[in-house]
Amino acid sequence: SASARGSSKISAYTKKYYCNLSHSLIAVFSFLAHKHISFEYKDDVAVIRFNDPASKVNKQSLQLHEFADVLGDIWLYRSSKSVVLVSGKPGCFLCWSRYMLQSCTTSEEVASLCEEAQKLFRRIEQSRVPIVAAIHGSCLSRGLELATACHYRIATKSKETVLGTPEVMLGLLPGAGGTQRLPKMVGLLGAFDMLLSGKNITADEAKKMGLVDQLVDPLGPGLKSPEERTMEYLEEVAVGVANDLANKKIPLTREKKLWDAVTGLGPVRKIIYSTVTKRVQKQTKNLYPAPFQIIECVKTGIEHGSNAGYLAEAQSFGKLVMTSESKALIGLHNGRLLCKKNRFGPPEKEVKKLAILGAGLMGAGIAQVSVDKGLTSILKDTTEDAISKGYEKVYKSFDTKVKKKAMISFERDAIMSNLSIQTDYSGFESADMVIEAVFEDLNIKHKVLKEVEAVTPPHCIFATNTSALPVRDIAAASKRPEKVIGIHYFSPVDKMQLVEIVTTDKTSKDTLAAAVSVALKQGKIVVTVKDGPGFYTTRCMGCLLMESLRLLQEGVTATKSDFLATSFGFNVGPFAVTDEVGVDIGLHISEMLCKAFGSRYKGGSLEIVKTMLEKGLKGCKSGKGFFLYGKTKSVNPEVEEILKNHQVTAPSAISSEYDMQYRLLSRCINESLMCLQEGIIQSPLEGDIGAVFGYGFPPMHGGPFRFVDTFGAERLVSLMKRFEDVYGNQFTPCQLLLDHTKDPSKRFYQSSPSLLQY
Amino acid sequence: MASMLMNPIRSCSVSSSWAVRFGARSLSTTAQLQSQVQTKSKKTLARPGVKNIVLVEGVRTPFLLSGTTYADLMPHDLARAALQGLLKRTGIPKDAVDYIIYGTVVQEVKTSNVAREAALGAGFSDKIPAHTVTMACISSNQAMTSSVGLIAAGQCDAVVAGGVEFMSDVPIRHSRKMRKTMLSLNKAKTLGQRLSLIGSIRLAHLSPELPAVAEFSTAETMGHSADRLAAAFGVSRVEQDEFALRSHTLAKKAQDEGLLQDVISFKVPGRDIVSKDNGIRPSSMDQMAKLKPAFVKPHGTVTAANSSFLTDGASAVLVMSEEKALAMGYKPKAYLRDFVYVSQDPKDQLLLGPTYATPKVLERAGLSMSDIDVFEFHEAFAGQIMANLKAMDSDWFAQTYMGRKSKVGTPAMEKFNLWGGSLSLGHPFGATGCRLATAVANRLKKEGGQYGLIAACAAGGQGHAMVIEAYPQ
């Protein structure tokens, strides 16, 4: 152990100095054996390995204390000339997991936890013994903060190695010095970019930015597994560097980049603060507090010194943890991870060969997310022109990656070799799953289903990609209804993370397991829903559109009603969405849903939309819909003209901006709850994930169910009652919502989320 | 040329084989066969129904560092020199060869079928067809085995195989955009069209495209891959430097002792006669330790001193069916026996060809590692050789990546590349294979062994190995 070494050398001064430190920080833990880190000397270099035996990722909470313990010994007894920090776990340097937040009830408690970590990291920064961080795998959040506190960073060029500060995406900020150290390291602009976007940075980018000092190539097969040997190699290189740092062969001071020097000038800094603030205001519509706190902390540190900066950071972190926004975002994060797991087990026969019908935007998109996951895919359409365009779309998506150097041309070609385009059914005899993305018309769907079943093997699954047609109606034409399932992809397929997987009463469990495994392979977040008109997301989105149409009739412009939605946190307004999806499709779906749900689903008059279609206003694809799409987006005067025949007087009692907003919102929340009540969705969690990732429900509210928990069922019902008085059953709260009103302790989520997984 | 033409043309009308045997004279004419070591009594690898194919003779030009004495030549000049050397050494009639195959890697666009251009210039009959093959560093291995194939199939009786590489001048191209503009200029009809095309040229279009010794599929240079390979197998810098030093020391010794009989003298037009390889430079460990890593910086282990250098050179061998060789009165040097080609992942196993090829070819020939008397492995990088040796010595590697029950086993170092290797003699990519085969044949003769093995790695993650058997003395 460290204490055996050179204890006699220690001077009275250092003993006192460091004993104080160890008493304040680590005394409690020093009697524990090191469970989460291991420690050895390689000549003059102390190598500290993080390794949590119980978890896949390295959790920092316990490790930090043991780590402080070991470091304290090194400082105290001067037992090594330099230190290397490395993870003993492949794929993860050090990740943030639970912040021990569950035990904290006040922001002060959280802030003091932050201060403790800050203190340790500042000691590391000031250590007279140089410390090298050897990074392989994800180095996020606290891991990155620790790495940046070290004196030198070496990272592997592995694809798994990513660096970043994703806290902002959880409504938080890096609370252990991240906002203070990054500006010094990567410049003010670079730091804002990292802190405010929360994006993952690859090792190569990190090297360019100055976040990492040296890169190490991942190794291939050798005398050990590539992963194991790469870790060893990284450690060997790091030990070499640590020696060179101790012997002053490598200087500890860094050359400052000219650009960073310029952005560090007083007046330039001011401009940067205000520009960044404005941009954040525009992007977040002031709905998220974290980005502003981040800007403030960075600013405080630079303008008023580190001590003020660290204090501000700890306090802001404490405050942010307690915000509903953060809780909502963390809840979504956890939910998203759950929906990326296969809850239905592996299918009897793994799907290896896909066939996709329809090479349009959808079909090509599905092919695009499949071929690079090793799924052999046939893309079939009826004309040469269609398949050629489909192929081009898929090719382009990978070629763009090649041009951005995210992929080499060989990889692109190998991926494209998984795709076969054709106009006939050849090869379908060996397909494991057929996904159809043909036009949303029951007769056409029946026709292709019969054609497909005639050529595919009995085990082949028929997945229909429909956004509204009931799957059971499509399955009615099938000889093998147990093999029919709905997979509702969202457009654009490569960007939208969600899929809804729709089962009918006849769909077999194995078919579901296979569909889920394919969707997960395609990198999707999976929500499983029962068959019904509009399933879940389309149904909820639909009533948002119906209510928006009514606002239009009441004299609110399309721009304004979209603004009502976006200012609440929706990414895009209902009319912009309709234009994007296509006005014809919007009408088709709305008519079908109105027919299915009757008067309670109604809102504005669909005659408006019908007239629009007669005039050829089909949305983005025809260049005009509710809006005109020229150089700038503007309200379409033709729609204004049509509206003249459909004007309705706005009821003054419920036409304030607030009321209008809640008319939009309460309808889709009520519809969501109704879906849970009817068993369309299985859990509030899936409902929230589906709403946020499917139809853009404001993420900082965490989804309709969390919103009800936070906002209060009673409050929502009382609003709805007022609207019900004017419009009737469209605003009648569903039974589930009423149940929550009766019992105020009833919650969709029992506990507030903590960072259980990362 | 004139002197070559005046060589006595041998009569080919020998009819009975015993007469041939008596009349055969060793083509390795000079005094190198000082002490004939007794061949150990091992079985021959001849198989019923399989034609015996022999290597009659092999020669090569001196291998020179690129940019030295050969600098002003063209690739086919070097190939021609090797062919002429072979003609001179064997005295074979210029129309007695059925086919000529040459291997090359970096192609001079003007002589893309360099085999044909060289053959014409060497004075071979213009009735002999010739083609060029390319398979990276095993191009001339491919030329040889193609010859074996032609003879085995009964299509030819005598084939010249060879290889050439000329790194003093490589094709450097205009950028793609510039080329496109220039090609369009050819087709432009009016002055206006021409002017607008010229006007479209931007400064960036003028930057040329330089060839790199990089994998097309992975964009990684070979040296970089070799460094990663060495690291994966835990090969240290010292081990690499030691191996490189060994290669240079052995090459120097072989050169000094006159063992490199395959080298012919070459009068370079306008320059002196070249008769020695010029890259052999035994240094010291201290000197080598001073060099900085060349590819992986700053912590890599592959340096200029422990890598093979860019080389100009050409080689040629005469391959014949045994009957034909004997009928023509030759005493062949060796039999070319079983051979294999292998290929694996071009990223992480780019240079492991020998590890994969060796056990395969040994199994095919029914031999074990210890049966082999002479090893000649291509030394691309010292780190690559050491990595292959470690891979062959690892049960884990054999089980995990090769699907074998146990390790391949390593060649005995006292039989391994005893006359130097690519690190010291040089490595003209396309020409090395024939040098390896000839070296094995000559060493078998000199050392009295019976079986030899050549193995090499090549870009693209490919590899080759061939068993060569001494021709009975």
Image (spheres, rainbow, N blue to C red):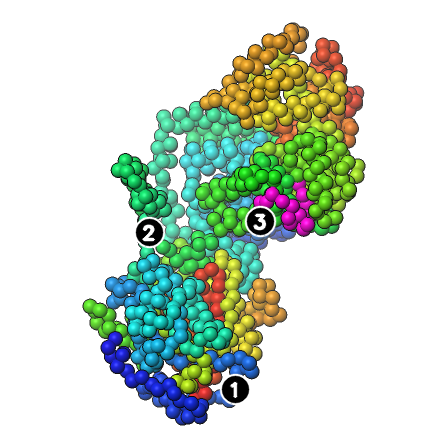
Kindly identify the residue that appears in the image at 38 percent across and 32 percent down.
A264
Q: Position of residue A273 (x, y in %)?
A: 43, 26
What secondary structure is found at the residue carrying circle 1? loop
- Residue B42 bears which disc, if any? 1
Residue A188, picture quadrant: top left
Span shown in magenta: A419-435
Subunit of label 2: B
Kindly identify the residue that appears in the image at 73 percent across and 17 percent down.
A730
Mark 1: amino acid: Lys
Q: Give the crowd class for mark 3: few <14, some 14-19, many >=20 residues within 10 Å.
A: some
Side of A180 relative to A439 (left or right): left
Disc 3 and disc 1 in contact, CB within 8 angstroms: no
Mark 2: amino acid: Arg
Residue identified by numbered label 3: A418
Q: Give the crowd class for mark 1: few <14, some 14-19, many >=20 residues within 10 Å.
A: few
Image depth: mark 3 or mark 1 in front: 3
Query: On screen, B447 above or below A509?
Result: below
> Mark 1 to mark 2: distance in Å?
54 Å
Residue identified by numbered label 2: B173
Q: Does the rendering let one see residue A270?
A: yes
Kindly identify the residue that appears in the image at 45 percent across and 42 percent down.
A404
Q: Does the rendering let one see residue A564?
A: no
Subunit of label 1: B
